[in-house]
Image: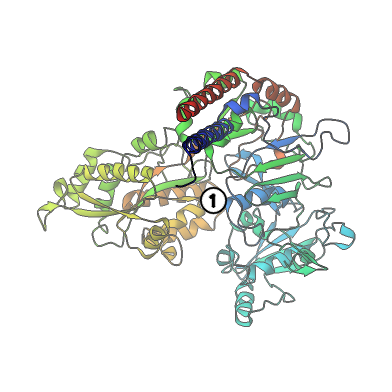
Amino acid sequence: MRGRGKGEGRKAKGEKGSGMARTFFAQFVRLAVIAFRLSPFALFFACDTNPHPAPTRTTRDDGTPWRVRYTYLADDPRGLDPQHAYDQMAHRVQEAILDTLLEYHPLKTDPFELIPALLETLPERTAEPDGKVTYTCRLKRGIHYHNDPCFPGGKGREVVAEDVHFAWLRMCDPKIECPIYSTLEPVVIGMHELYEAGKKSGNFDYSARLSGLEVVDAQTFKIRLSSPYPQIIYWLAMQFTTPVPREAVEYYDGKMHDGVQRATFNWHPVGTGPFVIAEYEEAHRFRLVRNPDYRTSVFPSDGFPPEKAEWLKQFAGQKLPMIDEIEWPILRETHTMWLLARQGYFDGTAVAKDAVGRVVSANAEISPDLKARGMSLEKDTELGTFFVSFNCSDPVLANPKLRKALACAYNAQGYCDIFKYGVSPVATQLVPPGIFGHINDWANPNAFNLERAKQLIAEAGYPHGIDPKTGQPLELSMDVTATGSEERQTAEYEQRCFEALGVKITVRENTFAKMLEKQERGQFQIAPSTGWGADYPDPENFFFLFYSKNIPPAGKNESRYMSPEFDKVFEQMALMDNGPERLALCKQLLEMLNEDCPCAFNFHKAYYVVVQPWARRTHANMMLEGGPKYLQIDPAIRARCWRDWNRPSYGPLALLVIAVIAGLIYAVRWNRRLNA
């Protein structure tokens, strides 16, 4: 250490202390800034708390306010190709940009009703002498695709029947992997042959003709079926069957052209819908703007629910869409969604289950503080049914009285109260409310009744749950998906329900993929929290879950229930039109399920939605993914609420400033002590 004096040593020590103080202070300030940015305080005194980008316009051509709808997507879609994409996020975007041949009446939900969209009228069905069925369809005239570079001069052309034929050819192309091919292939004439030819050659021939879709003229085509299949009309209300312009598929090939890489058709479909995608940033947001040339449909003039009839009449016959722009940020955090909705920056949001107690009162009304803001509360029930599956092919559970005993021991109401916060209703039957085949006054004979359950298990040969072969409690296994604490809690609840019979339940935890594999292969005894959501509102789409020809891998009969009598009635019911005779057969099928008990009904998924005062709902049709063309907003009410709800508040800022000053004083004093 030669050459350094005593004073130099003190200086070095002082430099070290000063550096530590600066580091401490810098870290303190950095953490304070981060905490401030992440805290609600920032929302009170920022110059502009609106998280959304500026809209594309502020006024319409007529000088009235430009109407923007602010909502969110929970994730990115996996793609937008109408013949391939099948996830919920894709469906939500597709509904805005693609018209379908038919669509659901937005105001009629009990029962649901199909109305023409791109078609001029509902298809005309003709039964042929040989058992075949033909549906004659006529397109509306004057419907044009969006203006797009794939067309000459960038001007969208008229939709013609050849576009429908091309779309259906795409469904037959093995490379497209259309999810509904396996459903339509057995009944649409010629689909199987084209698919197999494409699979064999490895290169699908788009010059081929599909015999099951005959183009009659520019506006007329016929769908030819080998046998009756009434559900075909529901598929005409989905994006899979929507017309596709060949020019768009050929143009958007994902390749380089003149030094510019084009998008793929999977991310740039060209349709006729009410909106056009103006912007998409992956993992960030979608922005859609209205299609100025939209003329496919208008707001309906009938079906108004009594409680909203007077208000809705003002929209009757109005040109669609009623809003001009949609802003869809992609958000995965429910806390963020709710915080922004409370400030008014979302036009509505589902209430997270852990927030139900704060938002919804004991008498199912919105909390007073939100009501004071003019917010309203809606309850949505999805078209699906959750249930506990029993493996009927298992040697032990092949005993129907044992299955009924387990079903009667299962407390579905308790499950809904604990894990669904009393929002989801208990399911008493397979077909959910709102779909033909649901019987309103039906009482489930296998509903929770522990005394009856104990009687049934004794009749099944296991008195008090004891296996007479071993003298010990009957051992059963229950396979569950367990990726989090809540799923383990539900499994423990279900285990306690069944063990009240005196049996022993072994819980086997699985990943989601492994659980699907076990159900597919029948490697389980009891599988709770299984269920089904409607592809279309028809009882066939639910009762087919127990049709013996749908045992995996052929279908979704994961209970492996087999009943020749059930199959016979199901096949008869599936081909009938809705009416008293069909309803009687649905009741008969339900009675057979109650008697044989391949499952224990649990709940229909439901949730609350908070709606802003300027974005009152025009419809609540769960077969629509939001129905964006029917949405409305009042920009004047929104502007006033945004201003009133987000006024600057300087109290929190003062507290933060005091905290920073206190930290600074502490840092300075600490620095002096180190230099002393």
Q: How is the image coloured?
A: rainbow
Is any atom of residue 87 visible in this view? yes
Q: In the shown orientation, is residue 250 left or right of residue 356?
A: right
* Position in image of residue 270 (x %, y %): 76, 57
Q: What amino acid is found at the position of numbered circle 1 in the picture?
A: Asp
Front residue of 110 and 264: 264
Front residue of 264 and 109: 264
Which residue is drawn at the image coordinates 46% and 30% (left, top)?
674
Front residue of 201 and 110: 201
Q: In the shown orientation, is residue 257 left or right of residue 434?
A: right
Front residue of 537 and 564: 537
**How many numbered marks, from 0 up?**
1
Q: In the shown orientation, is residue 577 left or right of residue 162?
A: left
* Position in image of residue 291 (x %, y %): 80, 46
Above or below 510: residue 672: above
- As drawn, the residue found furthest toward the left would be 471
Q: Based on the displayed image, in which of its 4 quarters is residue 82 positioned?
A: bottom right
Which residue is drawn at the image coordinates 60% and 24% (left, top)?
375
Is any atom of residue 627 visible in this view? no
Q: Based on the displayed image, in which of its 4 quarters is residue 415 positioned?
A: top left
- As drawn, the residue found furthest toward the bottom would be 201
Above or below 132: residue 304: above
* Position in image of residue 238 (x %, y %): 64, 54
Above or below 459: residue 352: above
Q: Give the residue number, with chain letter if any, for mark 1.
A: 538
* Position in image of residue 657 (x %, y %): 58, 22
Which residue is drawn at the image coordinates 47% and 23% (left, top)?
361
